[in-house]
Amino acid sequence: MKQTFRVLAVVFAICACSAIAQADPLTFATTLAGSNEVPANVSPGTGLAFVTINGNFMSVDVVFAGLLGNTTASHIHCCGPVGANAQVATAVPTFPGFPLGVQAGTYMMTFDMTLAASYNPAFITSHGGTVTQAQADLFAGILSGQAYLNVHSNLFPGGEIRGQLVPTPEPATLSLLIGGLIGAAGLVRRRNRAAR
């Protein structure tokens, strides 16, 4: 049994080292829904959003459909606990180039987060008054699960669909972890057979 725990410890150590070595880029995802808004609403709209942080760059990919209203804005809010409303962190009044006046659409953009234009000026002011501190606080908020992305519409000016950003495992790390666990289970099984 001690050998099994040693094998599992080695597998988890390898996975942890792999995750640290491949820390960039970090991807976060969410499912957008009216029920995630605070307060919740009855919108049948849905969507998916992916936010990838790679050094000083942040990519935002959004797909949405079925909104009751026409889009008026979309952005990332930070930094507050899950289930609470937070300040708009990214550019206002909306992400540059976000499709407005529609009930379905897609959006893909990469932002240089060292530029003040990537932020809500009020977010910079309330986070130390510098872009450097605003970037550090936004990235820390996303990493700690205290940020969400939402899409606003004319019928739901506070937000029609929303989702809390959560980390997604990298495919390589996830594959390594699954492979390691399968290998460890095989070793335990062989050891148990040999002991019989």
Image (tube, helix red, strand yellow):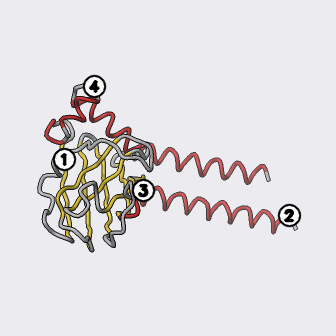
Amino acid type indicated by mark 4:
Gly
The Cα–Cα distance between marks 2 and 1, rounded to whole angstroms, is 58 Å
Residue contact at pointers 4 and 3, CB within 8 angstroms: no
Residue 37 appears left or right of 179: left
Residue under pointer 1: 111
Mark 1 → mark 3, Cα distance in angstroms: 20 Å
Q: Earlier in the sequence, mark 3 or mark 2?
A: 3
Sequence-wise first label, 1 or 3: 1
Going 18% across and 35% down the picture, which residue do you hit? Answer: 121
Mark 3 crowd level (few <14, some 14–19, many ≥20, 10 Å Cα): some
- The reply to whether the C-beta atoms of the residues labelled 2 and 1 are less than 8 Å apart is no
Give the Cα separation between the discs numbered 4 and 3: 29 Å
The residue tagged with tag 3: helix, strand or loop? loop
* Label 1: element kind: strand
Q: Say which label, 4 or 2, has the lower sequence index.
A: 4
Nearest-to-viewer mark from 4 and 3: 4
Q: Which residue corresponds to mark 4?
A: 128
Q: Position of residue 188 (x, y in %)?
A: 74, 62
Q: Which residue is mark 3?
A: 168
Considering depth in this image, is 29 or 38 the residue closer to the camera?
Answer: 38
- Label 1 or label 4, whichever lies nearer to me, is 4
Say if mark 1 contacts mark 3, CB within 8 Å: no
In the structure shown, which secondary structural element does the residue marked by tag 2 occupy? helix
Amino acid beneath label 2: Ala
Q: Is residue 98 left or right of residue 15?
A: left
Q: Which residue is mark 2?
A: 195
On screen, residue 96 versus residue 141, left or right, reads left
